[in-house]
């Protein structure tokens, strides 16, 4: 029996960079190109995990396989919005030609969870 293990969710926090969507532009072919603010200089520290609850899988279906979820403090309310982009799994904004180029997830609308905010991240395809 192992008695020496101390499980602390604070130890599971990982670096997260987020760039806010500022608008869209169009290329010469009329394709929409999203534009973003510069991501935060210092990474946020969030505990994010793959989506795996029955409720989340029922809601997102097949997309649940490419999603992650973070439960963050209510003090972050209003800081993040739908279509912002995130850098997860060790990805950083270093060396980007344009803000958001290295981002590998996009945010779904943040949800109010009473005393917390719940953010779902959806993997950007092709990244």
Image (cartoon, rainbow, N blue to C red):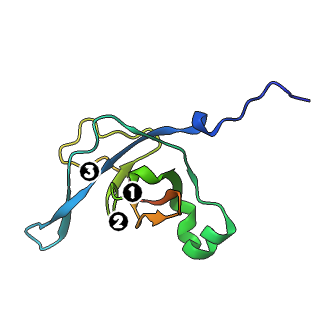
Residue 21 placement, left or right of 72: left
Lower position in the chain sequence, tag 2 or tag 1: 1
- Provide the residue designation for mark 3: 100
Q: Which one is closest to the eye, mark 2 or mark 1?
A: 1
Report x, y in % for residue 94: 28, 35
* Residues at discs 1 and 3 in contact (Cβ within 8 Å): no
Q: CA distance from mark 2 to mark 1?
A: 13 Å
- Provide the residue designation for mark 2: 82
- Provide the residue designation for mark 1: 77
Q: Which one is closest to the eye, mark 1 or mark 3?
A: 1
Which element carries disc 2, helix, strand or loop?
loop
Residue found at x 29% / y 40% = 93
* Residues at discs 2 and 1 in contact (Cβ within 8 Å): no
Which element carries disc 3, helix, strand or loop?
loop
Q: Which one is closest to the eye, mark 2 or mark 3?
A: 2
Q: CA distance from mark 1 to mark 3?
A: 22 Å
Q: CA distance from mark 2 to mark 3?
A: 14 Å
- Specify few, some or many for label 3: CA neighbours under 10 Å numbering under 14, 14-19, or 20 or more: many
For the question of whether residue 104 can be seen, the reply is no
- Specify few, some or many for label 1: CA neighbours under 10 Å numbering under 14, 14-19, or 20 or more: some
Lower position in the chain sequence, tag 1 or tag 3: 1
């Amino acid at each position: 029996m192992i008695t020496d293990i101390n499980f602390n969710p604070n130890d599971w926090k990982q670096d997260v960079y987020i760039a806010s969507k500022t608008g869209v532009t169009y290329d010469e072919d009329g394709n929409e190109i999203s534009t973003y603010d510069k991501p935060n200089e210092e990474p946020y520290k969030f505990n994010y995990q793959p989506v795996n609850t029955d409720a989340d899988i029922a809601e997102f279906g097949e997309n649940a396989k490419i999603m992650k979820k973070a439960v963050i403090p209510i003090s972050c309310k209003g800081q993040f919005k739908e279509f912002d982009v995130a850098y997860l799994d060790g990805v950083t904004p270093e060396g980007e030609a344009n803000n958001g180029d290295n981002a590998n997830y996009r945010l779904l609308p943040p949800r109010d969870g009473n005393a917390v905010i719940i953010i779902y991240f959806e993997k950007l395809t092709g990244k």
